[in-house]
Image (cartoon, helix red, strand yellow):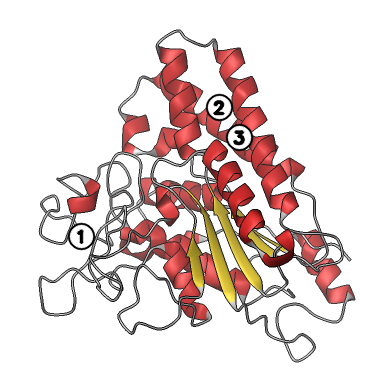
Amino acid sequence: MNFRVDRWSAVALRSSLVVLTTVSALLLSSCGGGGQSSQTNRFNPTRMIVFGDESSLLLPGSNATAIDGLKYTNNGFSTGTTTLDCNANPIWVQTLAAEYGLVFAECNPGGVTPTVQMRATAGGKVANVVAAVDAFLASTPGNKPVPTDMITMMVGTNDVLELYNRVITSELTEAAAVAEIERRGELLATQINRLTNDSNTLGRVMYSTVPRVSLTPFGRSQSLADQTLLRLLTDSFNETMRGLVRINGRSLGFLNTAQTFDNVVDDVNDGGRPNGIINVSVPVCTVAILSCTPLTLVTGGSIINHLWADDTRFSFAGHIFIGEDAADLATSLPW
């Protein structure tokens, strides 16, 4: 039995429910019900492996049990203080890990044995994920993941930005850039396929599209023609990747983050305030993102009323949407 799940946020009616495609819902029904009900044992991963770019990256603190590790979003303080706290304003993979009590080495004040491997990289592109997957498989006993591994995969924004800039500088034609971004989408799908199999004896992979770069503050600052190019490159990447992932039994969860962000932007533009967001066009941080704290925000801005932290990275509000979607999906799928 194959399952494919489309996950997106109906932000106008935000309720953090998993939305299944009609086909998936029918398939689940035919198997005796969906989700992790009494008919399905709850999936309890014992290890999480994080692949991707800085949207999934938590940096190490100043020592093994320090809480001052930084993130590429709105860094937070411990309650009532101005002390950096890696547990404050969790990024989406932290929210997912917390659902299962899994611990990052990069945010481990209790000094317990870490159960999350951070293999995302700042500025990461598909090529970096390929190298990271190679290294992971080489380090894994038997050179393969196991069914109790939760693996996350979100990358592509930096690839889009690179190829966009190469078109702008006339290094590449638009057609060549589209062909290259599609090649990278195919390569990312290949990495996802390496980590799962039809018999569900390898890992469980949660993979995601990336938001349209045309909707970021950077994208909005470009000409209409250039925004069209950014949208084309993003959509070509997402659609190619998504279309080439091999649907394996119950080994995959799909997060349509691109659709989630489209919905948020559309809702705000229509006068709505999804989860309190009022601004989808201006970065909330006034300083470089790793230095961004509640003390360095635009006037009237907060970590939950702006969608973007800087020109291309999610604010904490953006991570809330993705993190809630990921946790809801993970606990609703019949892994």
| Image position, residue 231 (x, y; %) | 51, 30
Q: CA distance from mark 3 to mark 2?
A: 9 Å
Q: Nearer the viewer, residue 156 or 280?
A: 156
Q: Residues within 10 Å of mark 1 (few under 14, many from 20)?
A: many
The amino acid type found where label 3 is placed reads Phe
Q: CA distance from mark 1 to mark 2?
A: 31 Å
The amino acid type found where label 1 is placed reads Ser
On the image, numbered disc 3 is attached to which residue? 237
Say which residue appears at 49% left-offset and 31% top-offset.
160
Work out whether mark 1 precedes mark 2 in sequence or the reverse, and give the earlier one. Answer: 2
Q: Residues within 10 Å of mark 3 (few under 14, many from 20)?
A: many
Work out whether mark 1 precedes mark 3 in sequence or the reverse, and give the earlier one. Answer: 3
On the image, numbered disc 2 is attached to which residue? 232
Classify the position of the N terminus by image quarter: bottom right
Within the image, what quadrant is residue 4 found in?
Answer: bottom right
On the image, numbered disc 1 is attached to which residue? 302
Say which residue appears at 10% left-offset and 76% top-offset.
81
